[in-house]
Amino acid sequence: MKINLELESSIPIYVQVEEQIHSLIAAGQLRPGEQLPTIRELAADLRVNFNTIARAYFELDREGIISTQRGRGTFVAGVPDEEQMSRKRLKKLHAIVCSALDEARRLGYEPGEIGEVFEEELKNMEREE
């Protein structure tokens, strides 16, 4: 299983892992019933904290994408349907926006400034379409 992380990305690592596992399943590179690496193995391979992978697996399990069976391992449960993919896309968008807002707040921008720039960029985006 090949997962590439962008450590400089504003998208949290656990979300990147989730998205890539989703993509591998959707592309047929991971098939229902196929066993995934253990949390410890994947954390070691990616050189990230154990808890980061645990969170990604927890979210995927909660969504019904994977199934963790105590003592046996973690397996692909099935291909996500349209509703699951839609929820995942929305979750990713929230993560992106929250990350940008957190960074803007850390840099000292006021909520009004952030809102104005956000609205301006949305208008620019709509004009480009």
Image (cartoon, helix red, strand yellow):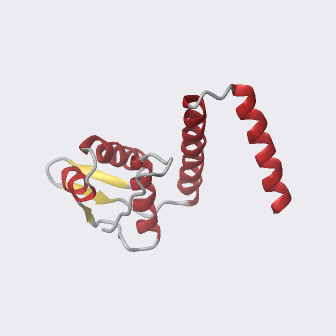
Front in this rendered view, residue 36 or 41: 41
The quadrant of the image that shows the N terminus is: bottom left
- How many numbered marks does the figure carry? 0
- Residue 82, horizontal then vertical, whole percent: 58, 59
Q: Residue furthest front?
A: 107
Q: Residue furthest left?
A: 71
Q: Residue at x 41, y 68 (%)?
A: 24
Q: Is residue 49 left or right of residue 63?
A: left
Q: Residue furthest right?
A: 127
The quadrant of the image that shows the C terminus is: bottom right
Q: Is residue 43 left or right of residue 97?
A: left
- Residue 37, horizontal then vertical, whole percent: 23, 59
Q: Is residue 15 left or right of residue 3?
A: right
- Residue 31, horizontal then vertical, whole percent: 35, 70
Choose top left, top right, bottom left or bottom right for residue 83: bottom right
User: Against 107, is 23 above or below?
Assistant: below
Front in this rendered view, residue 113 or 29: 113
Q: Is residue 115 left or right of residue 43?
A: right
Choose top left, top right, bottom left or bottom right for residue 51: top left
User: Against 40, is 76 above or below?
Assistant: below
Q: Residue at x 40, y 45 (%)?
A: 59
- Residue 77, horizontal then vertical, whole percent: 36, 59
Q: Residue at x 60, y 47 (%)?
A: 93
Q: Residue at x 24, y 56 (%)?
A: 42
